[in-house]
Structures are given as C-alpha cells and as structure tokens.
Amino acid sequence: MAVKLVFLGKLADLAGGPERDVAGPLDWDGLLAALPPQVAAQVQGQKVKLALDGALVADKAALAAPDGSEIALLPPVSGG
Amino acid sequence: MAIHVHLVDQPFNPGALLGPFTNAHPGYGGLASFIGAVRGDDDVRALELLHYEKMTRPGMEALAEEAAHRFELLGLLVMHRHGVMEPGEPIVMVAACAQHRRGAIAAVDYCMDHLKSDSWFWKRELRADGWHWIEPRDQDHSDLARWSK
C-alpha cells in the first residue's frame, strides 16, 4: 500500500507530474521529505492547502495520512 | 425545487439548456442566467481549467444548495466545463428561477462570484510563448467579500 499524492495547478509542473505514490503512512514531516524541494517549499507556505481523501486539512502539521489514502496539494484557485 | 450541477469535459450549448430549464419550472416569476466564455481578445489561443474530482464537484453541489436556500429558488442550473477550451467556447452557465426577479438575479451573481474565486479550479492560458498559470485576482476576492457583509 501507499499514499497517493495529487498535485493541482502549477504544483503539477513543479512536481513533474499530476500524481505520485509514496510509501505510507505519512505525517507532515514525511510528506515534506517525500516532495521535491521546490514543491516542499511551496507546501510549507500558507497559500497551499492540503486535503486528505477530499477533506481539507485544518492543521497541515497535524497531517496523518494512512496507507491507501490520498493527499491533494492545492495551490490558490483561479477558476471559473 | 430542482438543483442541477454538471461538470463536463465537452462543449455545451447554453441555449439548448435554457429552454428545458425554463419549461421545467412552470409558474416561476423570474429567471436569470449568465454565460461565461473564453474571451476572443488578447493573445489567448486556448484556456485549460483543471479540477480535482474529489472536491470540485462536491464543492459545486454545496454551493448550489447554499444559493438555492439563501435566495429561495425554485430551480438552479450550474454547468461548468473543465479541460481545454478555445476562444468563443462557453466555460460556465448558471441559471436560476425564483418567484421574483431579485432572488434569481442575485443567485446567479452569488454563484458566479463563488465559482470564480472559491471553487476548486485552476486555470492556465496558452499564448504564443506557451502555457501560463493564472493567479487569483484581487478583484475576485473583493467580489466574493460582498456576500459576507
């Protein structure tokens, strides 16, 4: 099993693709370690939000993603 | 009261949707609609809207429920494209019908402000020199703030 990372918007460009599987479970430090440095720097900023299985994570530092879950990395939206 | 939310990856014809939507609500007092399309000016050759399936559609459905309740609508239609679109293609359509005009007009305005700046979409434009991500605009956020006064 693994944790699926989903990169939205320009984070997909920085990450080199829209998705990546990494070994789980994953906490905040584990996530940062699993990301390319440029993406990790972005995710540490306030503008990028995280969702775990489709639900926004209120406190990124408290992330606890079990095996088989999906973490989305969400930059500011610019839609519609 | 009927709420219809669609997120599609193919072109749609707003006119063909409006007729059946109107017919489905006999006895309404006012109906308002808005259509947003890819502008034909600038240097933009194509526009791509990306979404996140686990959140974009549920977010649109929650927005539609909120608007329908807030403005006491009889019916609400929200149609949104994702994927690559060319100038002239419709991106979004919102149609609302209510007992009176103000509710219908306000509901469309409310939905559009929230779709523009509070929904899970990411946009990029293809210009002569390649793709450019579009950053959020301050105007979008001030438009959104009108509704929380």
Image (spheres, coloured by chain):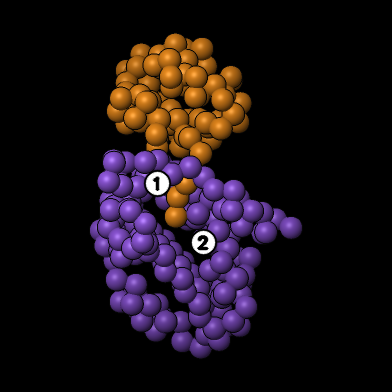
* Residue A55 visible, this orientation: no
Question: In the picture, residue B36 is in which quadrant?
Answer: bottom left
The image position of residue B88, as x and y in percent, is 31, 65
Query: What residue is rendered at 33% in x and 53% in y?
Result: B43
Local secondary structure at mark 1 = strand
The quadrant of the image that shows the N terminus of chain A is top left
Residue B18 in the image: state x and y as whole percent.
38, 77
* Residue identifier under label 1: B123
- In the rendered picture, chain B carries what hue? purple
Chain letter for the residue marked with disc 2 in the picture? B
Amino acid type for the residue under numbered disc 2: Met
Amino acid of disc 1: Lys
The local secondary structure at tag 2 comes to: helix
Q: CA distance from mark 2 to mark 1?
A: 16 Å
Location of residue A13 in the rendering, given as x and y in whole percent from the top left corner = 34, 30
Q: Which chain is orange?
A: A
Which marked residue is nearer to the observer: mark 2 or mark 1?
Answer: 1
> CB atoms at circles 2 and 1 under 8 Å apart?
no
Single out the residue that lies furthest toward the right.
B149
Which circle marks residue A63 in the picture?
none
User: Label 1: how many residues lie within 10 Å, few (<14), some (14-19) or many (20+)?
Assistant: many
Examine the image and state in which quarter residue A6 appears: top left
Residue at horizontal 46%, vertical 82%? B25
Task: Count residues near mark 2 (Cα–Cα under 10 Å), then give few for <14, some for 14-19, many for 20+.
Answer: many
Point out the tag, 2 or 1, that comes first from the N-terminus: 2
Q: Which mark is residue B112?
A: 2
Same chain letter for marks 2 and 1: yes
Residue A63 rendering spot, x and y as whole percentages: 54, 21
